[in-house]
Image: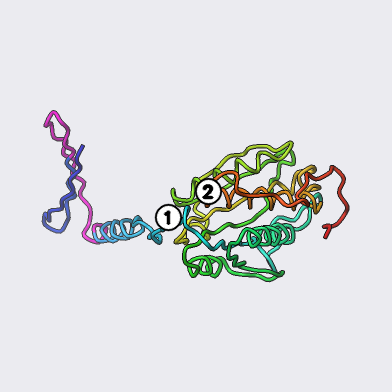
Amino acid sequence: MVFEFATAQIGAACVFVFRKKVESKNVLRIEVRVSRTLASLLLIAVVFALASCRTVSTPAVSNTSRTFSTVVVDAGHGGKDNGAFRRYGPPEKIAALDVATRLARKLRESQFKVVMTRSSDVFIPLEERAAIGRAQKNSIFVSIHFNDSSRRGIRGFETYYHSPLAYPLAQRIQNHLLTISGSVNRGVHHANFRVLRKATYPSVLVECGFLSNRGEGARARAAGARELLADKIAEAIVEERYGSGVYHAPANAIPPTDSAGSSVEP
């Protein structure tokens, strides 16, 4: 189906002609007479509408999934940005930093260079986080978060990606998280998050459970649970680079107990 647009002046007015062509070659002609002023306004509106529809450019992503030597670990939120903050769990910025720090340690033990976007409770803008990732050659980017919902019964793990080149890593991390007892699979999803969209290497964002859920929020307070989360993510990253059976979990990566204190354990 083809649409044509044309204008013609008739005296003090403009005529907008729309022709709709179909395969039968019948032509439907509709004429609407409007003033020159209105015609000009309509033309300006069309120009702006077309400009707003232009495609947003994104950086080209290099596939380093089988070659990366550096992992950029991004602890979500920080400083003035608490992230999710519910009574069942610690502030997201604290839990995310703790898991990210544990993950960084495990990756260094596996001989990767690790760069953290933050290593303390400070606010780092999203653009700066993405820039840190882009600056590291032959790398991948892993952002650690916890989830939140107004529905307290919602729980489970989610992993996000933007570039198709990051999908295998996202799926592998999700699969390893699902080996944790009692876990719920909320899937691997494409997302337009800035830290993923602005990346030039495979980048994923991991939601490590819902702080708004009584059970998952309480587990996020337990050091054993956070250690296990970091271990499963580290195992997935190592396997993405070197294949299955290479990663060896440290002895302290044990399943968490159901008990949890009222504050984040060390």
Residue 88 drawn at (x, y percent): 81, 49
**Which stretch did the figure color magenta?**
20-39
Residue of label 2 = 169
The circle on residue 131 is none
Q: Residues within 10 Å of mark 1 (few under 14, many from 20)?
A: some
* Circle 1: element type: loop
> Left of 154 or right of it: where is 200?
left
Colour scheme employed for the rendering of this structure: rainbow
* Circle 2: element type: helix
Q: Amino acid at mark 1?
A: Asn
Q: Amino acid at mark 2?
A: Leu
Q: Nearer the viewer, residue 151 or 233?
A: 233
What is the C-alpha distance between the residues marked 1 and 2? 11 Å
Question: Is 219 rendered above or below residue 52?
Answer: above
Q: Residues within 10 Å of mark 2 (few under 14, many from 20)?
A: many
At 82% across and 60% down in the image, what residue appears? 266
Specify the quadrant that holds the N terminus.
Answer: top left
Residue of label 1 = 63
Residue 114 drawn at (x, y percent): 60, 65
Residue 174 drawn at (x, y percent): 60, 43
Q: Nearer the viewer, residue 102 or 110?
A: 110
Question: Is 94 rendered above or below residue 216?
Answer: below
